[in-house]
Every structure is written in structure tokens, then in C-alpha cells.
Image (cartoon, rainbow, N blue to C red):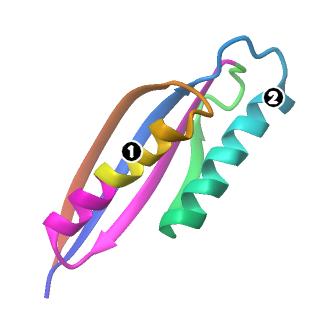
Amino acid sequence: MPVFVGVCRFELWIDDNESLKGKRSVVKRTIQRTRNRFNCAMAEVDDNDILTRAVLAYTVVGNERRFVNSMISKINDFIEDLGTAPVGYVVFEIDQYD
């Protein structure tokens, strides 16, 4: 039976932020709320030293491509609705493993 793995990478714009503490607050809140709601693996993956931008990624695993695609869409909508920071680019891919 095939396994489908979806990986999504997205950017948060943290406007008017001047400290690492402010950035950490936004990133931590976004990660915790998303993990609690969807039980997915999520982490900050790039631009750790830039105070006004955060790049995060998460993954979804399932046995149907349609399910993984649907979950990615739901998670992206949830993150945008959180309102912790405006979302910049969003890219994702779904790979199949046998």
C-alpha cells in the first residue's frame, strides 16, 4: 500500500518586530496552535536570524493523496485565520512511497 507524504513550507511576515523575543512569540504561538489542532510535525526551517520574517514547514502523512492534499489546504487556511502574522509564499509537494 502506498504512503503519501506532503511537505509544506511557508513564510510569515512579522511586521514592526524589533526583537528575537517578539519573533519567537509569533513562531511559537503559530506552531503550538497548529500542532494542537492538527497533530502535525512543524518547525522553523529558515531565516532564523531575520527578525521580520519566519519560514516554517510542516508535514502530513496519509495513505491517500486526496487526504494529504485536503489536510494541507485545511492547515494553510487555519494558519491564515490565526492572524499571528501575514502569510507570504506557500509551497508544497506530495510524494508517494511504496
User: As drawn, is 36 to the left or to the right of 80?
Assistant: right
Whether 26 is among the magenta residues is no
Q: Which residue is mark 1?
A: 76
The residue positioned 70% from the left and 46% from the top of the image is: 29
Image quarter for residue 90?
top left
Residue 98, position in %: x, y?
Answer: 15, 80
Check the image and report above or below for 73 versus 11: below
Question: Could you say which disc has been placed on residue 66 in the image?
Answer: none
The residue positioned 31% from the left and 60% from the top of the image is: 71
Q: Which residue is mark 2?
A: 22
The earlier-in-sequence mark between 1 and 2 is 2
* Residue 80 seen by the camera: yes
Image quarter for residue 84?
top right
Residue 35, position in %: x, y?
Answer: 57, 62
Q: Amino acid at mark 2?
A: Gly
Whether 67 is among the magenta residues is yes
